[in-house]
Image: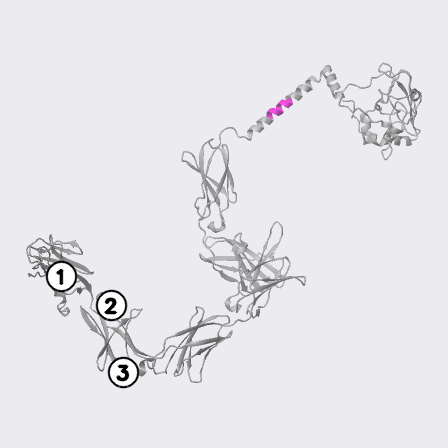
Amino acid sequence: MVEVDVQLEQVGSMPLKCSIWPNFIFLLVLATGAPVGSKGADEKICSIHSSKEVHMGSSFQVYCIFKKECKTLIFRDNVPLQCTSCNTTHVSLSIVNVTRATTLACRCEGNPEPCGTDITPGYPPEIPQNLICVQEGELGNVKCTWKAGRETYIPTTSRLWVGGDPVDYESGTLPDGTLSASFPIPGAQTNFSVLVNASNSLGSATSGVLSFMLNDIVKPLSPNIKKVECTSRQCQLYPDNAQSIQLVEIQYRADEGSWNTVSFNHTSSNTSWTITSLNPYSLYTFQVRWKLGPTRGVWSAWSRAEKLTDEEAPAAMVDAWYIEETTEKVKKNIHLFWKELSKSDARGNILGYNVSVVDQGKKICNTFITPPDRSYRVPCSVCNVTISAVNSKGQSSARLIQLQPIVSADNFSSIKRIDNHSIALSWTSEGTVKEYLVEWYPAGCKQQLQWIRVEHHLNTIHITGLQPAECYDGAVIYFRPSGTSKAVFSNIATWPSAPQQGPNCDTMVKYERVEVTWQEVPSEKRGGCLIRQYRIYLQEPGGKIKNYNVSHPQRQYTIKGLAQGQPYKLWISAVTTAEGPKGFECHFVTHQGVPPAEKPLALVLSIGSAIFLTCLFLLCICQFSSVHRRLSRCCHCLMPSIVPDPANSKWAKECANEKGEMKLQLYLSDSSMSEEEPDTVEVQELPQEKLLQGETVPIDGACPSVSNFEVQAQEHHIPSSPYQPITTSSYLKSLSNSSDTTQASRNTDITVDYISTHGVLSGEEDDEEEEMDMMGFFPCPTSPFLDPLMPTGGKLTLDIVKIDCSDLNLCIQ
């Protein structure tokens, strides 16, 4: 069999102390041919005799020597390389700066069987550091630990050598990367010497020798805390394995606070350790370790225990304050708020709050409010409210809040910005003030009330926790023996900026104009206290953009002069110190045609004009007598068929009480009444004895006097009288419709106080007097649209008798 050598030669210079490793040569033996008795089968072509680990970053030459002539190939990680020197029987290649694992292979073309090797770069081990040995318990094995140093990247072995008869113990790796090895105590030996040796294919290293006595390295087992008992101020720890321990160290802390350390000298009589000066209702963590003596052995590992201390009654009053709110139903609504007690003040789990309301010395109500609620609506506006916190051990002292009118003060307050989250507030101090209270809240949101109480000798505080670019309002409250007052401050912002959000718009299209309305930007998105203006952007169909500025707080604007039937786009932004982003876009299309609101107006004008012209035309034609008579006949049918008898009226009856009287003699003939021969009646008017000419009867319960009738009769005349009335009046009496009037009744002379009717006054008419009094009659018959109903001249008939409307009005007045 013919051997083929693959050799690797070092390139460059390496320190001489690195021995042969920088100048090593890889020998690769490749063989081809068929073994005897195996015709047609391929022999193993190569064998490798070399180290597989090299120094990190080293460089070398690779040589491949073949048994027969062929076309030679060389590969690195399956990638063909161009050889540095090659012919039909050997190949050489330079490998530079190897920093990762690499696979090298050589083969003949046409022969799939290669020969090659895997090369891994690495480091020789460093000298082990921090060698420490301890004995686990007084009867346990000795355990040694050390640090291996830098990672070698190639297999490395570390072994612990124990002096005396040299014995080595293989190490293991702990979770933290530390190496360790343990060995038993042989017999009564107490003195030991140990060292660590680390080695790999690139080199080896040995630590220094560590010598010790068992008495110095013994480490007791960790304490076992079986029980912890606590009151509100102290805790007691009980171990169960402290027989030979002399020194104890205990660390404790509440919640996540800092550690406190106490030490104890343990004796056989000590069965527990007491930790004092603790806080009530606090979760304490204890960790304990110990050692055999001050100079013997080492500290044990820590052991931990936790315990909650007991509760106490709350130590501080609840900090409470209130706001006044005005609603539509209630003019003044008092809303009480209070803060949660700190853990040190609460001294336990707060079960609830007792709230009592006292008005004028009488308790109105007592309410128990459970957490997490910390507010209460007070049912009165001028009263006293007390509040106290309650836990399982008792309740705190009561905080008294006097609800009384707070007057405004003109005290000066100065505000200075410290950073984006805090301000410094100062005010004018007064000697009579018992205490100050500073309140603040986001503008328009009193429900997020915050406050702080300040002692009377201070006049400056720092308000922290403010949100940048948010607006705040507040006040400084002065508590005096004589009353309470407050100085208000407003529009406080730590970092004004542009709004973070734009207003959302809404549009109402009205043909060539659009009405735009929008919502207010939320206070937390305004970027400051005051919005200076709004800016409306209108994009026209051609893409041109117009803007309109609207002052705050106006939130409505009308844009006119738009093209009909065209699409538009609109959006709005708010401006504080700078302009903010735009809100949601509004898209709309204008209407076409005449606005619907103008069509009813035109219709009303047309109808009104028509009615006016019609009335004007009728008024003109009424000037003609023929038309006037026809219209009068039409209007005459609207008159009532029954006209009440004035003789039955109340005022006519009261005329009978006057000293004078008027008699009307009716001379009725047997002939039937007709238009040609009307019945006549004689009217006689007697003068009143004391009524002089020109006098009128007062209207204080009595009827006014009836004036002289200007009557012209053909057959009968009224005698002259010395009484000459100033006015003349007449009255209209309708004809009786009764058909059963007898001849005797018509021939009977009837004397009445005023004017009688045809026929006999029956009892039926008397029964109807009250009803007739309530009935109306057709008003003034002297209408310009009616002809005179009574002819002038001739006999005085009932048809002719009438009364002047003007006198009737005087009577009524």
- The mark found on residue 186 in the picture is 3
Q: Is residue 507 left or right of residue 699?
A: left
x and y percent of residue 638 in the render?
75, 23
Q: Is residue 611 above or below residue 16?
A: above
x and y percent of residue 500 in the render?
44, 49
Identity, as a three-letter code, of the amino acid under mark 2? Arg
* Residue 751 appears in the rendering: yes
Is residue 55 inside the magenta stretch? no
Q: Residues within 10 Å of mark 2 (few under 14, many from 20)?
A: few
Name the N-terminal-most of marks 2 and 1: 1
Q: Quadrant of residue 759?
A: top right
Q: Which stretch appears magenta?
A: 605-612
The residue pinned by badge 2 equals 150
Q: Is residue 438 left or right of residue 105?
A: right
Q: Residues within 10 Å of mark 3 (few under 14, many from 20)?
A: few
Q: Is residue 379 above or below residue 677?
A: below
The residue pinned by badge 1 equals 60
Alpha-carbon span between mark 1 and mark 3: 51 Å
Q: What residue occupies the far front of the structure in this picture?
A: 37
Label count reads 3
Point out the image quarter for the C terminus: top right
Q: Quadrant of residue 770?
A: top right
x and y percent of residue 139 in the render?
33, 81
